[in-house]
Image (cartoon, helix red, strand yellow):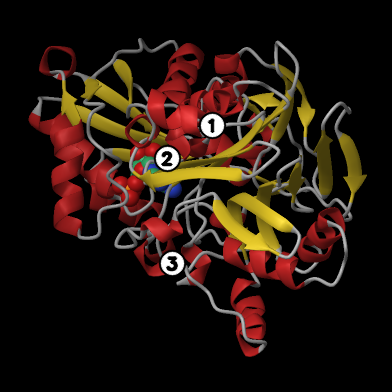
Amino acid sequence: MLENMNEKCAVVGIFGHEEASKLAYFSLHALQHRGQEAAGISSADDKKLHTIKNRGLVTRVFNEDKLKTLKGSSAIGHTRYSTAGDDSILDAQPVFARYDLGEMAIVHNGNLTNAEEIRNKLIQRGAIFQTFMDTENLIHLIAKSEKDKLLDRIIDAVTKIEGAFSLVFLSRTKMFAMRDRHGFRPLSLGKLPNGGYIVASETCAFDLVGAEFIRDVKPGELLIFEEGCEPVSMQILEPTPKHCIFEYVYFARPDSNVFGQNVYQTRKEMGKELARVKPVDADIVIPVPDGGVPAAIGYAQESGIPYEMGIMRNHYVGRTFIEPTQEMRNLKVKMKLSPMVEIIKGKRVVVVDDSIVRGTTSLRIIKMLKEAGASEVHMRISSPPTTDPCYYGVDTPDKEHLIASRMNEDEICEFIQADSLAYIDKEALLKSVGADKDENYCTACFTGKYIV
Ligand code: AMP
């Protein structure tokens, strides 16, 4: 249970701005793709912290009146993406606590790999937990630390936890941002237009609030924000970068720059690489919207085959991935995507998607395209086969549900009823992200080679 609790979420922190909670709200809005389950903001004035969080989309959780109650010049926020069936409001973030030094709130994107071990030790020492979130461990570690200052207690706590974490802490007067030693999940620092600073999971949040990108928070670095000062940097953990390559493949928004590169350009490059290594004779290239769009554009440009919007996506349906039963997932794919018969009929179609997880989407789409009259359907995937689950914060099913862990490419091709199927391999993927070797990237979902 524990290992699934802080899936691909988004975090934001605003410091030193009169309208901190409003800016946090807008930032969360830009980061909504990283989690639609719940949203929350804590703000700090000199007297106390204020928190509002609830299930649902950012626009549903907040309105003007609520934001007005989130007073103060600093705020942190979170959007949450969790596994199905777990709908407790207690599991929404920020996690807030009162302790001997005052009040604090924490937001977390990532997944702690030693959470269970730490929790058991804490429980043996008398701690009581209210949620299943690994983030609650941090509250206890900070509260129980014997150090006098919050800064030292945070250092104490982050040196005990392992795994993936991009964290933002808020106290009444300070804000802290911390990234794990591998920098699994992104976290960037920016400057706000009228003074103050922002940290956010992705730079698309900066664009919305008019912030200027300064740099990424470094792996293992702690940033301390204090009134009237520039952020102070402390290198707490030895950096060994292993950025999540799946952020480039699927998760981050195309207009963001993560790990130093623009996501859209990187995805387009993956599509070009796919066209070079896995060409096919066809009449049109179409994307599986929205994930497959940049790679399909790249594939079309490189191959010279015309790009068409062959499938329409209905944006008012939630993600299909989180539905618990196969039957529901099938229905949701149909609700979400529909073919354009006029474009597809009689054509040899290359359909490009970013990944195949269970195989549900590909199977449905190929059936749909054939029913719409496609004469051939060639599936092209702009990443390697997803063979292994992620323990560092991306929501993937257990290994047995990952189609590529049970079947080889020919078997998958037959299962999804495609005329041909091809992926890019790990080397081609790394080449597209501008890396010769996988030294700086975590590719465990394609290789099963876990770092921690
Ligand atoms: P599936 O139908 O299970 O094979 O899922 C593949 C589809 O889900 C692709 O269209 C991907 O864009 C998308 N996808 C890949 N990874 C994730 C994820 N972690 N969460 C939600 N959707 C995903």
Is residue 142 in view from this perspective?
A: yes
In terms of sequence position, does the residue under pointer 3 or pointer 2 come before the other? 3
Which quarter of the frame holds ligand 1?
top left
Where on the picture, by quarter, is residue 159?
bottom right
Give the amino acid at mark 2: Ala
Do labels 3 and 2 touch, CB within 8 Å?
A: no
Q: Nearer the viewer, mark 3 or mark 1?
A: 3
Mark 3 vs mark 2: in front:
3
Q: Establish whether ligand 1 lies closer than 8 Å to the Cβ of label 1.
A: no
Observer-nearest residue: 392 or 124? 124
Disc 3 and disc 2: Cα gap in Å? Answer: 21 Å
Q: Which residue is mark 2?
A: 422
Q: Considering only order in the chain, which callout, 1 or 2, is on the residue closer to the N terminus?
A: 1
Q: CA distance from mark 2 to mark 1?
A: 9 Å
Q: Quadrant of the C terminus?
A: bottom right
Q: Is residue 79 among the parts visible in the rendering?
A: no
Callout 3: CB less than 8 Å from ligand 1: no
Q: Nearer the viewer, residue 32 or 443?
A: 32
Determine whether, in the image, residue 411 is placed left or right of residue 432.
left
Q: Which of these two is toward me, 172 or 435?
A: 172
Q: CA distance from mark 3 to mark 1?
A: 28 Å
Q: Residue, x 86% and y 58% (percent of image)?
A: 149
Q: Residues within 10 Å of mark 3 (few under 14, many from 20)?
A: some
Task: Name the amino acid type tagged 1.
Answer: Val
Question: As drawn, which residue projects farthest toward the bottom?
Answer: 124
Q: Disc 3 marks which amino acid?
A: Lys
Q: Which residue is mark 1?
A: 277
Q: Do callouts 3 and 1 mark residues in contact (Cβ within 8 Å)?
A: no
Q: Helix, strand, or loop for circle 2?
A: strand
